[in-house]
Amino acid sequence: MKKLSTPYYLIDEKKLLGNMEKLAAIKKHSGAKLLLALKCFATWGVFDLMKPDMDGTTSSSYYEARLGYETFGKETHAYSVAYSDEELKKVSLFSDKIIFNSLSQLQRFYPECSDVACGIRINPGVSHSDFDLADPARKFSRLGITSVTDIETAMPMISGAMFHFNCENEDVGAFETLLSHISCKYGTFLDQLDWVSLGGGISYTERNFDRLGFSGIIKAFSEKYGLQVYLEPGEAAVAHTTSLVTTVLDIVENDKMIAVVDASIEAHMPDLLVYRESASFEGTIAAGGYPYQIAGRSCLAADIFGDGYFKKELQVGDTIVIKDAAGYTMVKKNWFNGVKMPSVAVMRADGQMEVIQESFYSDYKKGLSKELRI
């Protein structure tokens, strides 16, 4: 670790392959196909570790769809809340399935992609989410169509549909209840379709998740309607596989001891800030020890990773390892305050560390502007 300057994201190959084994078991027992959700994780340097157990990628934009096609291969599913004319033309060139968010977009673009399998996103009006911010069925949601009449109108143009109605759902019983609601409400339409995506937001790889029970529910649903079911793991695919490795730059005291590290929650783990969640750290204990708040180096007053009890007093130069820094993290990192962008490294199964991405001042400068010729 000392050979690479901090901050950097460190992906553990063994842990990633462990998640793939769990997903492969679901795939085997359920008959579902698995698509990596690039909106959550798109570090394509490790896609070779994921390809054997997954069937392709699903996207939320032209750039994501193209990246999946070029670097992952297999099936490429394209979805966007709204396509522009130019984007749709590009997406239709390499996508196996294009899913539209509204009836108006489907009707508008169907003539241009009638030779591609088209689908529509349906908002069932029910969901499992502890965060209103991420609840696809929240009041006034623009995500998917809600009108049965609109679904009837769409049927001649589509071969499948997407229901994305979960966020961090570890409760298989709750999932089964929601799926039963969908089955009862939309069974007439499901009978006419060839495939359905049930989206992501399921904690497939957590230790206590009932993968066998979940697989049975999916298999029964698939067989009932003669459907190919797609699942879209994102965070579950990379959960607990990656750390953000940082160095303590300073120790300050203001009613509590605060260790300032060379990373930033605003720039490098912004999802924690958005959802007001605390990071967890390696080397901490449940209670006792030495309490510290771990804070970022940006000027944002709330640039705080979280609090922990450490086994020893922290010193300038100490390494602080922040856990679970893959999902919705690397894809969201930014150049706020011009803070150095973390490198990305992989800890291989043989113990060797391989750097797969580095950023420099030139990347920061190019991302902001270009010289104008006057």
Image (cartoon, rainbow, N blue to C red):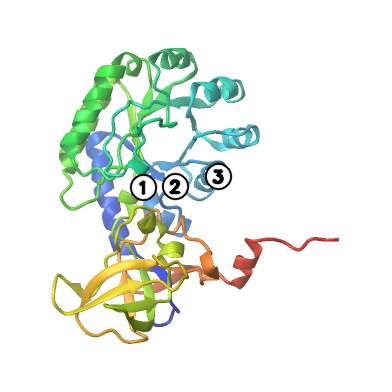
Determine the CA span between mark 1 and mark 3. 17 Å
Q: Which residue is mark 1?
A: 234
Kindly state the secondary structure of the residue where label 1 is placed: loop
- 236 over 356 or under it: above or below: above
Q: Residue 53: where, in percent of width, then height?
A: 34, 47
Q: Which mark is residue 66?
A: 3
Q: Which mark is residue 181?
A: none
> Callout 1, which amino acid?
Gly
Contact check, label 2 and label 3, Cβ < 8 Å: no
Within 10 Å of disc 1 (Cα), the crowding (few <14, some 14-19, many 20+) is many
Contact check, label 2 and label 1, Cβ < 8 Å: yes
Query: At 37% from the left edge and 52% from the top edge, which residue is drawn?
Result: 50
Determine the CA span between mark 2 and mark 1. 8 Å
> Callout 3, which amino acid?
Arg
Kindly state the secondary structure of the residue where label 3 is placed: helix
Q: Which residue is mark 2?
A: 39
> Callout 2, which amino acid?
Lys
Upstream in sequence: badge 2 or badge 1: 2
In the image, taking residue 212 as reference, residue 274 lies left or right, namely right
